[in-house]
Image: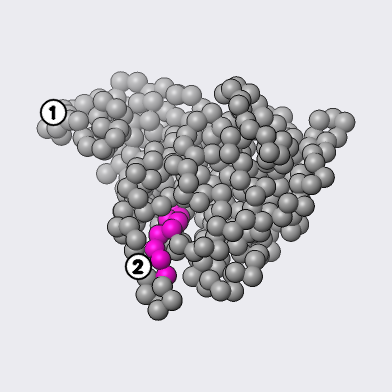
Amino acid sequence: MLEHCVNSIMLPRTQLTANFRSFATRATKAKTEVDRIKHVVAVASGKGGVGKSSVCVNLAFSVQKLGYKVGILDADLYGPSLPAMVPTSVGAAGPRGTKDGKIYPFIFHDAPLMSMGFLRPGDYSAIRGPMVSAMVQQMLTQTLWDDLDFLFIDLPPGTGDIHLTVSQQAEIDAAVVVTTPQQLSLLDVDKGIRMFDGVNIPTACIVENMSYFACECGRRHDIFRRGAGEKLAERFGIHRYFRLPVDPAMGDIGEPFVLSEAVHRSEAVASTFMSLAHSTVKAVEELRQRRSVPEVVAECDGATLAVTLNGKTARVPARAVRLNCQSAKMVDEFTGAKLFKEEDIAADVRIIKIATAGRYAVSI
C-alpha cells in the first residue's frame, strides 16, 4: 500500500519505514573542490575481501571508455588499495600541494586519483575516529579534482564514520554495492543498503563478484549457491544486478583489468564491466532528474499520511504506515521477521506527531 502510493507520485525508491525520508533541498554550504564534479558515485561493500576496490577502479575506467572524465578517491584509510592497482610510477613523485592547502591529485590514464596510500606510502594507519573523518574530508574537498563528470569513491567495508562523512560532504548521486555469493557477505550488504537508504543515497546497482567460474569448455559453474543475490536485489527493488566470474586476471596488480591485455582474453568480465558502466551512468542520470524536485512535504490529519511532491499528493492510511514500520520494535534487525501480529494494530490507529529526525528523515 505505502510503496504503491509513493510510486504513484514517482518518489525515489525507499524502504517502507516509519522514518519516511524528506527529500528537501540541502542546506547551503561553502564551495569546495568536490562541487566542480557533476556526479559522485560511492562504491561500497558490507564486508571486506569481496573485490570492492577492484570493481571500483575497473568501473571508473569503463565509464571513462564511454567518453566521460572520471576520477577515483580511495577513502579506505586503514587499507588503501588504489596504489597497488596502478603502476608504481603514479605515486613515485610523492604528494604535492598548493600554498592555500589544496592537494594535487595523482594522475593515471588521464584520471585524477587520491589515496592515503599515495600520501603515506608503505605506512600503517593507526588513526582514531575523529582524525579519520577529518582526513577523508580533506582528501575529498581539497583535492584539485578539476571538472569531472564522475568521481568514484571507494569506501571502506562496513558502515561507519567515513561513510557518514562522505555522505555529508558530497552530493552522492548513487551507490554501487559489491558482494560475493556467500550468505554472510549478503547479510552485511543488506545492512549497507539500509545505511545508504538512511542517508538518502539510493543504491543503483548490486555487483556479485566471484559469482561463478567460467570453464574453458564454455560451462558456468556456480561455486556457491546461486539466487541469494538476485533475491536481495529484488527485495530492495534494485533492478540493475550484475554477476562477475572468478578470473585470475582480476587479481593482478599494477594495472586495472579493463586497461590491460587480459581484457581481450576474458570477454565475460570485460562485457560485464561495460554493461555495469552503461547502467551506472543511466541510473545516475535518472536519479539526478528525480532529485531536481526541490522539496517533499509530509502532512498528516491523524488518520492518513499525506506526502506531497511537486504538486502531487499521495495519501497513505496511518495503519499502513504502522504495518510497514521497520523499527527495532516492529522487525527483528537480524532476521527481518515481524515482531508483531497485524491483528494487534488497531484499525483506527492515528498518527499523533511528525517531526524531523536529523538531516535525512521525518519521524512519524
The reply, left or right, for residue 341 in relation to residue 195 is left
Q: Which residue in the protein does label 2 denote?
A: 221
Location of residue 196 with respect to 345 vertically, above or below: below
Location of residue 353 with respect to 95 vertically, above or below: above
**Residue 24 percent coordinates (x, y):** 52, 34
Q: Earlier in the sequence, mark 1 or mark 2?
A: 2
**Residue 300 percent coordinates (x, y):** 35, 28
Which is in the foreground here, disc 1 or disc 2?
Answer: 2
Boundaries of the magenta span: 206-214
The residue located at (77%, 52%) in the rendering is 89
| Magenta highlight on residue 267 | no
Quadrant where the N terminus is found in the figure:
top left
Nearer the observer, 176 or 281? 176
Location of residue 256 with respect to 290 vertically, above or below: below
Question: Residue 60: in sight, yes or no?
Answer: no
Q: Which residue in the protein does label 1 denote?
A: 344
Quadrant where the C terminus is found in the figure:
top left
Nearer the observer, 259 or 20? 259
